[in-house]
Image: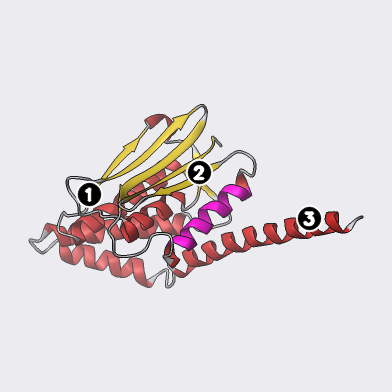
Amino acid sequence: MNRKTEKSMLEDQLLQQQLENNILEEKMRSMRLQVSHSFFPKTLQYLIKESEKEEDQAIHQSFQLLDEVWNYGIRTTGTDHFVRLADEWKYIHNLHALNTLRFNQECFVDFHADPAVMDVQIPKNMLLTLYENIMKYADYQNKQHPVQFWVEQKNGEIVLEVENLKNGKIPFQEGGSFRIGHQYIKSVLVYNFPDSHRFEVKEDGHRFKVSIQFPFR
């Protein structure tokens, strides 16, 4: 075996290890969010019941949404790297509803989904990562130019796209959180669809667009 071949094999092994480490890191992040399994849901149920006594429906709705978000996180904890697209789509809708309440109805995202892809299995936390980047980098309080979030199919593949104006507060390409999200998405795509995926990030001075494409599963 020549040195070039040995070097190539070593590079492949290091890449594979890095991909596995990135996925493991994301799984640990999800687990840390679910500490104290009994305390949190029981407290939420108590707050939901108490909020029913109040006239402020926004408080009651907030607790109900938090309960649904928590339950989804518990259900999807495990070794399976894939989830039903419809389930994670509902999950980010619940998160968005919470943010809409938090920002006094000033959180504008237009969601577009092809019903034909709702039962497709997708990598876990893929949609969540895209939504988190919206809340980090997008000008989501711009009513005239709302964030656009698409889920559709093209030639037997899933296409996920997000396009929006930047908020101007954080340099997009330099943000540490973006690098983590970027690395996670790229790692998952390379790990599960090594030769059949597309991941593009385009930006200019005012807006950015993220495009992801991978086969049906």
Q: Tell me the mark number nearer the camera, choosing from 2 and 1.
A: 1
Question: Secondary structure under badge 3?
Answer: helix
**In the image, is residue 211 above or below residue 173?**
above
Q: Hey, what amino acid is under mark 3?
A: Ser
Q: Which badge, 2 or 1, comes first in the chain's sequence?
A: 1
Residue 102 image point, x, y percent: 20, 61
The residue carrying mark 1 is 108
> In this image, 132 relative to 104: left or right?
right
Residue pictured at 10% horizontal, 64% vertical: 54
Quadrant of the frame with the N terminus:
bottom right
Residue 186 image point, x, y percent: 55, 52
The residue carrying mark 2 is 122
Q: Is residue 80 visible to the viewer in this orientation of the structure? A: no
Alpha carbon separation for disc pair 2 and 1: 25 Å
The residue carrying mark 3 is 8
Q: Which badge, 3 or 1, comes first in the chain's sequence?
A: 3
